[in-house]
C-alpha cells in the first residue's frame, strides 16, 4: 500500500487575481440586475456567449452557479426542493441543485460576495443542446418563472466527423438568434462587435490550451484540481479582455514553475488522466488524496472542453458553429476514443480514471465499453469511480479511497 501522509495543496499565486476578476464579474451582474441599466442573458456553458456579449448583454451561466453549489457542498441540501417539483433525482444535479437553491432562496454567492443575495434576473435565456437536453429543460423552468424569452440552438448529437451540413445548420440557427435578441436588447447587431468578441474568445481559448498543456511536462506544474478552479474565466469571461489577461498571467506562472523545476505534486510518481466531471464537493479532498499517493491527476476531458480551436473572427458564425459542434461531448464514441488516446500519449499518462457521474450520462464515458476498448489499444490501465458532480449522497468516500489506493498499487506493481 502506498504510504499516505498529510499534504497541503500547492497554491497558485494567480488565484488571487482570478478571485478579483470573478468578483468584479458577479458584482457587475448584480448591479445590472438591481438597476436594470444593462440587459442580462443567461447562457449555457458552451452556448453562444460571443453573440450575446457582442450585443451588449452581461452573460450569466447557471452551470457555474451549479458548480458553486457543489463546491460549497450546498447542493445536496437543496436538490430535494427541485425533486419535490417533479425534477427527478436521476437528472442533472446542476439543474436540481440550481433550481432547488432558487426555490429555497439561497445562493453560495451571498457568502462569497457580500451584498449579493440572489442570482441575476434574466432578460433572455439562451441555450445550446450541444451538451445535453437537460439545459433546455433547466432554462425553460426559469423562462416560465421569470416570464422571459427562451431561445435555443438544437445541436446534432453523437457526431462522428463534423461535416459542412452540421456546421451550416448550426450557423443558421445562430444567425436566427439575432432578430429576437435585437428585440430584447433594443440595439442593432454589429458584425464588427462580434468579430472583436470572437477574436478575444479565440485568444482566451488558445491561452487556456497553453495553460492546460503545461501539464505534459514531467513533473506537471498543474493538477486537474487546479484546472477545475482556474477554468472559471474561460467559462464565464471568454470574449473579454480580462480573461485573456488572466490566462497570460497564469501561463507565465506555470512556465516559471517548469523553469524552476517546481512540481504541482512533490515527487510525482504517477500521472493520471481524469475523464468526466469533477466531484465538486470533494475537489479538495481528492486533490489531497492523490497528492498523498504521489500521484498527479493532471489532465482531463472536462477542462479541455473550453478549448475552441475553430474560432475565427473573419468568419464568426461558421467558426462558432464549428467550434461548438466539434466539442468532445457532442461526438460519437469513435471520435471520443481517438481524442482520449491522443491525450494519453501527449500527457504521458500512466492510468485513466473515469468518473461515472450518476446524474450526468452526457459526461460519463464509461457506460458503453470505452475504458475496455481504450485499454486494449493503449495498454494503459483504467479505473471507474462511481459518484456524482453535485449530489454527495451518490458518493462513497470509503469506496473511492479503497479503489483509488488499489489502482495506484496496481500501477506500482506494473512498474516493477
Ligand atoms: S452536461 Fe451533464 S452536468 Fe452539464 S448540464 Fe448537462 S446533464 Fe448537467
Image (tube, helix red, strand yellow):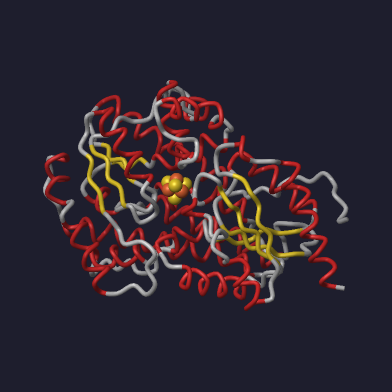
Question: Is there any visible trace of residue 233 in the rendered image?
Answer: no
> Which of the two residues, 95 or 270, is positioned nearer the viewer here?
95
Residue at x 21%, y 57% (from the top left corner)? 174
Quarter that holds the N terminus:
bottom right
Question: Is there any visible trace of residue 10 in the rendered image?
Answer: yes
Quadrant of res 295:
bottom right
Outermost residue on the bottom side: it is: 377
> Which of the two residues, 326 or 267, is positioned nearer the viewer here?
326
Image coordinates for residue 76, horizontal then vertical, percent: 56, 31
Residue at x 56%, y 48% (from the top left corner)? 357
Please, is residue 152 above or below residue 203 in the view? Answer: above
Residue at x 60%, y 62% (from the top left corner)? 299
Image coordinates for residue 313, horizontal then vertical, percent: 27, 66
Quadrant of res 263:
bottom right
Please, is residue 375 above or below residue 151 in the view? Answer: below
Quarter that holds the C terminus:
bottom right
Residue at x 47%, y 63% (from the top left corner)? 207
Callout count: 0
Image coordinates for residue 245, horizontal then vertical, percent: 44, 54
Please, is residue 238 above or below residue 113 in the view? Answer: below
Image coordinates for residue 191, horizontal then vertical, percent: 17, 59
Amino acid at each position: 500500500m502506498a504510504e499516505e501522509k498529510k499534504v497541503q495543496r500547492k497554491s497558485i499565486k494567480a488565484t488571487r487575481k482570478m478571485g478579483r476578476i470573478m468578483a468584479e464579474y458577479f458584482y457587475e451582474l448584480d448591479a445590472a440586475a438591481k438597476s436594470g441599466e444593462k440587459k442580462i442573458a443567461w447562457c449555457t456553458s458552451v452556448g453562444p456567449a460571443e453573440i450575446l456579449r457582442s450585443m451588449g448583454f452581461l452573460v450569466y451561466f447557471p452551470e457555474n452557479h451549479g458548480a458553486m453549489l457543489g463546491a460549497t457542498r450546498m447542493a445536496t441540501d437543496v436538490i430535494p426542493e427541485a425533486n419535490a417539483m417533479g425534477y427527478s433525482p436521476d437528472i442533472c444535479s446542476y439543474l436540481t441543485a440550481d433550481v432547488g437553491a432558487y426555490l429555497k432562496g439561497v445562493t453560495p454567492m451571498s457568502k462569497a460576495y457580500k451584498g449579493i443575495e440572489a442570482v441575476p434576473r434574466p432578460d433572455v435565456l439562451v441555450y445550446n443542446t450541444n451538451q445535453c437536453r437537460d439545459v433546455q429543460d433547466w432554462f425553460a423552468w426559469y423562462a416560465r418563472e421569470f416570464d422571459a424569452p427562451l431561445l435555443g440552438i438544437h445541436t446534432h448529437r453523437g457526431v462522428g466527423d463534423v461535416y459542412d451540413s452540421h456546421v451550416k445548420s448550426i450557423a443558421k440557427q445562430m444567425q436566427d438568434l439575432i432578430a429576437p435578441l435585437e428585440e430584447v436588447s433594443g440595439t442593432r447587431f454589429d458584425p464588427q462587435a462580434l468579430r472583436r468578441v470572437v477574436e478575444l474568445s479565440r485568444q482566451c481559448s488558445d491561452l487556456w490550451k497553453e495553460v492546460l498543456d503545461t501539464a505534459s511536462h514531467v513533473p506537471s506544474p498543474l493538477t486537474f484540481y487546479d484546472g477545475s478552479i482556474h477554468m472559471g474565466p474561460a467559462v464565464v469571461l471568454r470574449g473579454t479582455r480580462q480573461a485573456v489577461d488572466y490566462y497570460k498571467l497564469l501561463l507565465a506562472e506555470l512556465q516559471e514553475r517548469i523553469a524552476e523545476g517546481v512540481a504541482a505534486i512533490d515527487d510525482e510518481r504517477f500521472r493520471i488522466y481524469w475523464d468526466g466531471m469533477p466531484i465538486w464537493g470533494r475537489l479538495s479532498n481528492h486533490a489531497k488524496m492523490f497528492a498523498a499517493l504521489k500521484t498527479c491527476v493532471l489532465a482531463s476531458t472536462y477542462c479541455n472542453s473550453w478549448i475552441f480551436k475553430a474560432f475565427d473572427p473573419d468568419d464568426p458564425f461558421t467558426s462558432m458553429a464549428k467550434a461548438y459542434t466539434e466539442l468532445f461531448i457532442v461526438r460519437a464514441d469513435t471520435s471520443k476514443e481517438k481524442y482520449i488516446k491522443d491525450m494519453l500519449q501527449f500527457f504521458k499518462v500512466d492510468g485513466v480514471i473515469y468518473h461515472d457521474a450518476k446524474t450526468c450520462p452526457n459526461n460519463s464515458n464509461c457506460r458503453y465499453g470505452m475504458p475496455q476498448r481504450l485499454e486494449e489499444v493503449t495498454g494503459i490501465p483504467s479505473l471507474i469511480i462511481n459518484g456524482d458532480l453535485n449530489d454527495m449522497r451518490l458518493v462513497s468516500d470509503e469506496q473511492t479511497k479503497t479503489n483509488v489506493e488499489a489502482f495506484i498499487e496496481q500501477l506500482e506493481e506494473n512498474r516493477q
